Image (spheres, helix red, strand yellow):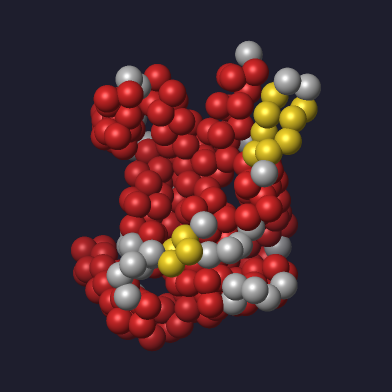
Amino acid sequence: MNLIIQHLIDAVSLGGIYALAALGVGLIFGIMGLLNFAHGDFIMIGAYVIFLMSGRPVFVIIATAVIAVVLLALASDRFVFRGFRKASGTTLLIVSFALSFLLQNIILMIFGGRPKAVDFGQGLLQSFTIGSVRMSQLDIFTIAMTAVLLTVLTLFLTRTRYGIEMRAAASDFRMSRLLGIKANRVVAMAFGVSGLLAAAVSILLVARLGAVSHTMGVMVVMYAFIATIMGGLGSLPGAVLGGFIIGFGAVIFKVILPHDLAPYRDAFVFGAVFVSYAVFPKGLISIGQIARSRQRK
């Protein structure tokens, strides 16, 4: 039982990181129809800001990383994606790939290709015991941070005017514009919130890995894409649910796979996703399901 609890905490912690990343991806897709591959590089830029700020007070590091990534996300909207608002989804995806490669190569030219060790959040790697269950402080911090961010974002989306406008735009962007919602403002807010979520993932990843590299966001954004698709494209609750499912799947396969197959864990996770998508081709929570549930109310 103690082992099960420990694995459950690991799964919720890892799932929280993927849920935050998937929510950032899903938010932009819901409004713009853009699967932003550069979101992983927003995470990477935040990690390098933490690397550059090493040695300073923790709150200064976190605040600087958040501000830098949010400004980067807003700048990408203003100077990169705004000119492609009416482009097809394929064109937007190609533009996001181009931005991703640009950011990676800028970091590569400045810092080189070798990972850099970062002394950040090392105190969280210590463990403590409750009863007979041993827990990592980092896992508890990750779970708490995820819960706070999801709660604050939920309140923002449901209780504030700007949040309601974002939800309306995510449900039907064209109709929301006809009703008077300003497109540029809504998209800018969505990019700002996605930048905030990317910065949060940066903080958690650097604390977990203790190193940064120019490709560190690639696998995270791949998992975020998969979680978004699994949960239902355009569904923000679905993106969060998909992120937690991916995290649980990764931990479960890590535990049950034989030692020889452990290095292929990601392949088994992706295989399980294919099966899920075959059973639920529109995702676990589709926009249609959400609309029907609202009509019943």
The residue that appears at 53% across and 33% down in the rendered structure is: 11
Asked if 240 appears above or below 214 in the picture, the reply is above
Residue 288 seen by the camera: no
From this viewpoint, which residue is outermost toward the bottom? Answer: 79
Determine the image quadrant of residue 95.
bottom left
Position of 132 relative to 225 (above/below): above
Residue 271 or 78: which is nearer the viewer?
A: 271
Q: In this view of the protein, which residue sits in the foreground, 199 or 264?
A: 264
- Residue 29 is left or right of residue 248, and the answer is left
Image x and y of residue 291, in percent: 50, 42
Is residue 128 shown to the viewer in this render?
yes
Provide residue 229's location: percent of width, then percent of height.
Answer: 35, 44
52 versus 159 height, above or below: below
Q: Position of residue 35 (x, y in %)?
A: 34, 59
The quadrant of the rendering that contains the C terminus is: top right
Q: Residue at x 41, y 79 (%)?
A: 76
Q: Is residue 212 left or right of residue 5?
A: left
Residue sitting at the far top: 1
194 relative to 264 in the view: left or right? right
Residue at 55%, 27% in the rendered image = 7
Q: Position of residue 50 (x, y in %)?
A: 56, 71
The residue drawn where x is 40% and y is 19% is 256
Vertical comparison of 57 with 139: above or below: below
Image quadrant containing the N terminus: top right
Tag count? 0
Q: Which residue extends farthest right?
A: 131
**Left or right side of 31 for 272:** left
